[in-house]
Image (cartoon, helix red, strand yellow):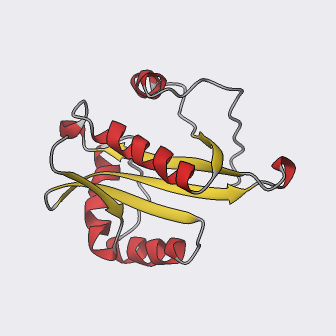
Amino acid sequence: MIGLQIREAASEDVAAMLRLYAAGDFATKDAFTVEEAVSHLQAMQRQPSMQVFVACDGEAVVGTYELFIMDNMAKRGRRSGVVEDVMVLPEYRGRGVGRAMMQDAMERCRRAGCYKLTLSSNLSREEAHRFYDALGFTRHGYSFVVELG
């Protein structure tokens, strides 16, 4: 997408990020207020292995994702990346924003020396699965979850 910029999220982006979540699959009745979300973003940014990114079309935030890079004890310290909370404004889907964000995540992981990048996706999100398939992700194993209250 021409003019798309992907950069680390800043406090000024939080309101737009919350609108993104509300417009998509992450809408919840107990969403952060802007003030709470700014505080949470700042806490995340204090973790060197955790980053939050936004995709911008000009000044407009049109996508976001989170990237966690970890060292693995069982893999002789080899690093791996985990992508979470990928969201693109509905009116920007199909225009290359998601692809650009995932390519950005893959490149960041390559530069960090990761041997793999993983993500999980709800079983019902078949369109998202086709998108990840097209990017070269392969379906691997199972994802398990336990709700802790």
Relative image position of residue 20 (x, y in whole percent): 29, 51
* Quarter of the figure with residue 60: bottom left
Left or right side of 110 for 56: left
Relative image position of residue 2 (x, y in whole percent): 15, 44
* Quarter of the figure with residue 34: bottom left
For image coordinates 42% across by 28% down, the residue present is 128
Comparing 1 with 39, the one in front is 1
Relative image position of residue 1 (x, y in whole percent): 20, 40
For image coordinates 41% across by 70% down, the residue present is 37
> Residue 42, relative to residue 21: is it above or below?
below
Left or right side of 34 for 148: right
Is residue 26 at all visible to an observer of this figure? no
Q: How many marks?
A: 0
Relative image position of residue 83 (x, y in whole percent): 53, 47
For image coordinates 58% across by 57% down, the residue present is 112
Left or right side of 46 for 41: left
Comparing 33 with 41, the one in front is 41
> Residue 90, relative to residue 79: is it above or below?
above
For image coordinates 44% across by 28% down, the residue present is 135
Is residue 6 at all visible to an observer of this figure? yes
> Residue 97, relative to residue 131: is it above or below?
below
Comparing 31 with 48, the one in front is 48
